[in-house]
Image (cartoon, helix red, strand yellow):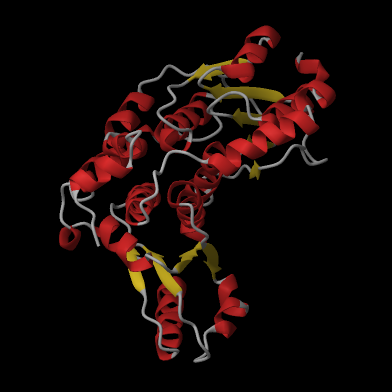
Amino acid sequence: MVLEFEEVERIDRFGLHRDYIDWPNHANEALKIEVKCPENIEVDRIIIGGMGGSGIIGDIIQDWLQFKVDIPIHVIKDYHLPKFINRRSFILVISCSGDTEEALSILSEALKINAIITTISSGGILEEVSKRKGIHHTKIKMLLTPRSSLPYMFYTSAKILIKSNLINDFTNELQNSINVLKDISKTLMPNVDLEQNISKRIADWIHLCIPIIYASNLHRSAAIRFKNSLNENAKIHALVEILPELCHNDLAAWLKNGLEGWRPLFIRYPNEPIEVLERFNAIKEIIEESGVEIIEVIAKGESNLDYIMSAIYILDFASIYSAILRGMDPKPIPNIDRLKVTLERRLKYVERFCKNLI
């Protein structure tokens, strides 16, 4: 196994790992961005629309705020808005590139129902249409890829919700989560040996296997994000199972019947509620009795946001190291690029179905 700094630099030809090295600094920059949004509005629900690296922002916000706010938060990862959305809905459309056709379709439908709209992008059609239609738009920096630009999208989105008076002022909590990222970054760097680097140990653990990522509902977004990062960076498949639901289906498959090639990974956090703690312990016993070992990743910090962001940071770095072990440059995503070209040729979706944007 080779995960030396020189090997990371050689295989990661575009330097995607450098985006992650600087994540704490990018997060600090994001928290300073002057966001544009409606202020002191009254709405019946919050809708966050986006895909991929932009769409995960909605999942993170859902997990972070599920026990902090009274207003429902819905995440839309599709072309269309549900029927229950109306002019009293606050819709935050996120597309790092600004050209994601699903996000543009959501914007088009939101305009038709006269909803309260705010947008985030690094430019593209989303910025252009927002300016033309008088929609509040916040421009962010895009790093080497949308997925590595997560700090700009998340912290900007959080600031928009605060400034719009849709949630309490959690600025201190946001800053504390950045401090946690800064603290743990020292142990995740490419020049840190495997024994002291949890991200490298995770990559080594799942190498040449299919990871099954287990998390509670509090860390659902971190599990989904790790699966997505493994797909894009390492170009491998991964499965996600969420507790307690997995106890009613997935767990039945852990028998001594040829389970080679599967590697369970638990995302844990300090001070788990008793129902989460005991379920994880019981699941671990059953899986280990089937002859399969488990690796546990313990999130860092003191708040739920700390846990989510630290887990994502640790696991995103693991996806980079997983790519290096496979000799795979983590930046290029040729299959996704090919699909976008194919769909543009066959569908011409924005041109055909979002004419109110043109």
- Whole-percent x, y for residue 96 in the image: 53, 28
Query: What is the quadrant of the N terminus in the image?
Result: bottom left
Residue 117 percent across, percent down from the top left: 66, 23
Residue located 75% across and 16% down the image: 357
Asked if residue 146 is positioned above or below residue 325 in the image, the reply reads: above
Question: 49 or 145, which is in the foreground?
Answer: 145
**How many callouts does the rendering have?**
0
Q: Is residue 91 left or right of residue 10?
A: right
Based on the displayed image, in which of its 4 quarters is residue 343 positioned? top right
Is the residue 143 above or below the residue 280 in the image? above
Which residue is painted at 36% across and 55% down in the image? 322
308 above or below 204?
A: above
Judging depth in this view, the residue of 108 and 212 nearest the camera is 212
Q: Choose top left, top right, bottom left or bottom right for residue 354.
A: top right
Residue 189 showing in the rendered view: no
Q: Determine if residue 340 is in view.
A: yes
Residue 18 image position (x, y, % from top left)? 29, 35
Find residue 272 and report its horizontal and vertical position in percent.
38, 66
At a point 66% along the width and 42% down the height, the residue shown is 77
Q: Is residue 11 left or right of residue 263?
A: left
